[in-house]
Image: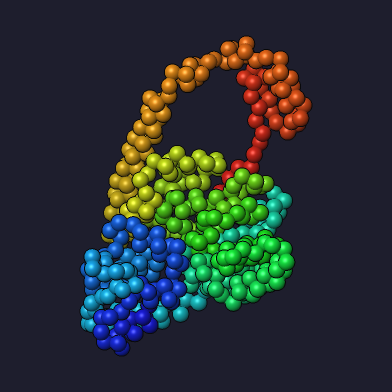
Amino acid sequence: MRNRLILMRDKKNGDIPLVEQLLTEEEMDEDLLDSILAGDNLLETDPIIENTSMDSTIEEATELPELEENQPSSSALKIKIDWKKLSTEIDELERYIQWARSIGVDTKTRSLLQALEIGFSRMVEMGAAQKVVIFTESRRTQTYLKEFLDANGFTGKVVLFNGTNSDADSTQIYERWLETNKDTGRTSGSKTVNIRTAIIEHFRDQASVMIATEAAAEGINLQFCSLVVNFDLPWNPQRIEQRIGRCHRYGQQHDVVVINFLNESNAADQRVYELLNSKFNLFNGVFGASDDVLGSIESGVDFERRILDIYQECRSLEEIQKAFQRLQAELDQTIQNRLKDTRKILLENFDEDVHSRLRTNLMDTRERMDRFSQMFWLVTQHILDGKASFDNQALTFSIPSPGLNHFS
């Protein structure tokens, strides 16, 4: 960030394609940037750079000014620079850099080793493979964590997954995969697809840790992995469920352990977690339980933006508590109204035939059960003997399935 501002100062003009520069420097994943920029009114309208020293990638992205109508694309974005503020900001960032360098290894990163130890011990108990996917939102954090884990017992066991997969290790993995599969017919015409496949298979067969950005939250199958670590816990509940869903999916043979990193000394972080856990049912151990709740909110991005407003505007504990209480009250009302409306629509649009079928009671079902159905029921009991519990009165059976464990 400091170097980018110095570049602006040295060029001494406002003709800086800022969006293009952000992508070129690969400071954030394209998928995450696209989702942020897609939200209405997420871009600031003030064309003067102010406070770019914010440490969140979301905050940094929201500082981009809104495009004028006659501008063809975001790559042509031009900004007007306040040179006095620019110099002040460079000085401020210099102080932050010196402060950061004095820290050494931060507490959060050291805690990752403890989290992996706890998670892998659970994998041993369950008989699951000792593999973990660690989600973060920044490529710089991703690289930093890999270097840290390489230096602390995980050398050669860590693989990265992001929007480009252009690092040296990923390139080598890709080249080996191509050589191995050149005569198998498994390669596609897309390099992007091939390299994603190569990395996933390397993680499955050789590596123990995959550090991923949001690019890994959709479109890939990690059911061979049973441990998810949210090193950066996003505020968008839909993104959290997408992350967990990479591992906790049909075909998973074990419970999925989810470890969330939470700053317990930060009141806002605590309230965010409470909302995600209690209101969106993301960590309560029931597969798919959050579907109804997530479907009742207009947009996870809207919710995320509300959280961002609280972080930016509230400074005292009292302000934080009041802001979250208002948000929680709105969520309660929105969720309940949407669920009520959905149920009403479903019932009102059922035709008479459906209503009559729903009114068929248990006694009628047993009376209408023909000989073939009775034989099928007996065969089912025989095949699943010892594997399922049967209720002969209700004519139902249940098979225990892996749940979702959660550790904070």
In terms of image quadrants, where is residue 58? bottom left
The x, y position of residue 300, in whole percent, is 39, 51
Seen at 59% across and 77% down, the residue is 168
How many numbered badges does the structure rendering display? Answer: 0
Q: Is residue 262 left or right of residue 152?
A: left
Q: Nearer the viewer, residue 139 or 87?
A: 139
Examine the rendering and report whether any part of residue 223 can be seen.
yes
Q: Nearer the viewer, residue 317 or 306?
A: 306
The x, y position of residue 14, in whole percent, is 25, 81
> Relative to 53, is 324 above or below?
above
The x, y position of residue 41, in whole percent, is 28, 58
Seen at 70% across and 72% down, the residue is 179
The x, y position of residue 276, in whole percent, is 44, 48
Seen at 50% across and 40% down, the residue is 289
Q: Nearer the viewer, residue 195 or 277?
A: 195
- Extreme residue in the bottom direction: 10
> Relative to 82, is 252 above or below?
above
Examine the rendering and report whether any part of residue 117 can be seen.
no
Q: Is residue 143 left or right of residue 126?
A: left
Q: Is residue 250 left or right of residue 75?
A: right
Seen at 57% across and 63% down, the residue is 193
Q: Quadrant of the N terminus?
A: bottom left
